[in-house]
């Protein structure tokens, strides 16, 4: 039987929540890679992933903190990637969203799994080094998951008036960043949206120039020698494809700790390029969680890919023969492991 081609998507912050507590133990307990990640954190005097994942109760103040969430999410995603049945599936490309880029680097073979973990672990700490500010999510898509261009122009104008910056282009959503005062002013000046703006607790002004201190810390401590050419195509947050024989390791390092931190992350474009260029048989969203599934569905709707032209069409396809496989979703995970 011919293998099915898959596009692998690595999730970012906000995907390890109360329902995901115990995810590593449930799916990856006893793996040597998890033991290695635990040992690395123990050497630094940090609580191990097994301890954090095995906590009796989920603590929002602890588990969503950057230096805790980043390594938990990396480990869950990367170990999910290693669990995919390669006898039945061929990975044709890898991409990620925001901090999922660090996982994507490892899944694509541009860095080792251990170095990928060290990068995610360090960036979880570095992400807390920034000028004052935060993020908010604006839902621009209507009930049909399509975005009205006129609404987007009005939102862009309001952002410009108050000095709020785009942070992540996320399907039918836009994550914005800026100072607290700027975000407060923007919220009062926005047109009516399908949902109220959501301020992301504990998040900094990610993917903006306000993260310069974080970028400088990364460049000073995370060496370019860890980077190599990806083994499979890797799509970054601009939609650039890094191919094995066309990629330069130094340039990949420079992007990772430069543009990727300091400029908007366009997950919408990354997914659009990946789907059009590689036309995968399935898209596999690594765990933990499945919160990125809606954004991926909205990209499919915008493309009218496989005649998925609305939210209802996406839901119908998922119910009949799921095109998007979420490894954090029981009943779908089993399809790929």
Image: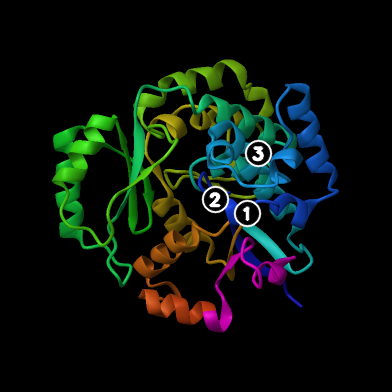
Task: Tell me which residue sits at (46%, 56%) in the image.
Answer: 271
> On the image, which quarter does residue 222 sit in?
top right
Observer able to see residue 229: yes
* Mark number displayed over residue 271: none
According to the picture, the residue beneath numbered tag 1 turns out to be: 20
- Picture coordinates of residue 80, whole percent (x, y): 70, 54
Residue 211 vs 175, above or below: the answer is above
Label 1 or label 2, whichever lies nearer to me, is 1
Q: Secondary structure at mark 1?
A: helix
According to the picture, the residue beneath numbered tag 2 turns out to be: 15
Q: How far apart in space, not on screen, are marks 3 and 2 (Cα)?
A: 24 Å
- Picture coordinates of residue 283, whole percent (x, y): 57, 64
Q: Confirm or deny contact between disc 1 and disc 2 (CB under 8 A).
A: yes
Residue extent of the magenta highlight: 319-337
Please identify the quadrant where the C terminus is shown: bottom right
Within 10 Å of disc 3 (Cα), the crowding (few <14, some 14-19, many 20+) is: many
Q: Confirm or deny contact between disc 3 and disc 2 (CB under 8 A).
A: no
Left or right for 164, reference 273: left
Scheme by which the image is coloured: rainbow
- Picture coordinates of residue 200, whole percent (x, y): 40, 42
Q: Earlier in the sequence, mark 3 or mark 2?
A: 2
Observer able to see residue 287: no
> On the image, which quarter does residue 66 sit in?
top right
Label 3 or label 2, whichever lies nearer to me, is 2
According to the picture, the residue beneath numbered tag 3 turns out to be: 110
Q: How far apart in space, not on screen, are marks 1 and 3 (Cα)?
A: 28 Å
Within 10 Å of disc 2 (Cα), the crowding (few <14, some 14-19, many 20+) is: many
Residue 80 vs 125, above or below: the answer is below
Q: Earlier in the sequence, mark 1 or mark 3?
A: 1
Task: Tell me which residue sits at (61%, 46%) in the image.
Answer: 58
């Amino acid at each position: 039987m011919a293998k099915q081609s898959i596009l692998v998507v690595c999730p970012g912050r906000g995907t390890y929540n109360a329902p995901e507590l115990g995810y590593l133990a449930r799916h990856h307990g006893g793996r040597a890679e998890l033991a290695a990640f635990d040992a690395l954190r123990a050497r630094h005097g940090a609580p191990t992933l097994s301890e954090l994942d095995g906590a009796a109760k989920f603590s929002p103040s602890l588990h969503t903190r950057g230096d805790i969430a980043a390594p938990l999410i990396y480990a869950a995603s990367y170990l999910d990637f290693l669990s995919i049945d390669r006898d039945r599936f061929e990975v044709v490309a890898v991409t990620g969203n925001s901090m999922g880029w660090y996982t994507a680097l490892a899944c694509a073979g541009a860095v080792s799994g251990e170095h990928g973990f060290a990068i995610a672990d360090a960036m979880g700490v570095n992400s807390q080094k920034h000028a004052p500010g935060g993020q908010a999510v604006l839902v621009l898509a209507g009930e049909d998951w399509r975005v009205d261009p006129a609404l987007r122009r009005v939102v862009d104008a309001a952002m410009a008036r108050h000095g709020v910056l785009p942070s992540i282009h996320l399907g039918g959503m836009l994550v914005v960043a800026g100072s607290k005062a700027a975000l407060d002013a923007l919220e009062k000046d926005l047109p009516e949206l399908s949902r109220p703006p959501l301020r992301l607790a504990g998040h900094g002004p990610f993917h903006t120039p306000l993260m310069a201190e974080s970028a400088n810390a990364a460049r000073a401590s995370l060496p370019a020698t860890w980077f190599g050419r990806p083994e499979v195509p890797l799509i970054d947050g601009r939609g650039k494809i890094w191919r094995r024989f066309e990629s330069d390791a130094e340039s990949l390092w420079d992007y990772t700790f430069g543009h990727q931190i300091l400029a908007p992350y366009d997950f919408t474009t990354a997914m659009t390029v990946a789907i059009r260029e590689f036309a995968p048989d399935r898209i596999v969203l690594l765990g933990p969680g499945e919160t990125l599934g809606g954004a991926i569905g909205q990209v499919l709707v915008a493309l009218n890919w496989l005649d998925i032209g609305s939210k209802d069409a996406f839901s119908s396809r998922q119910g009949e023969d799921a095109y998007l496989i979420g490894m954090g979703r029981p009943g779908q995970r089993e399809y790929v492991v």
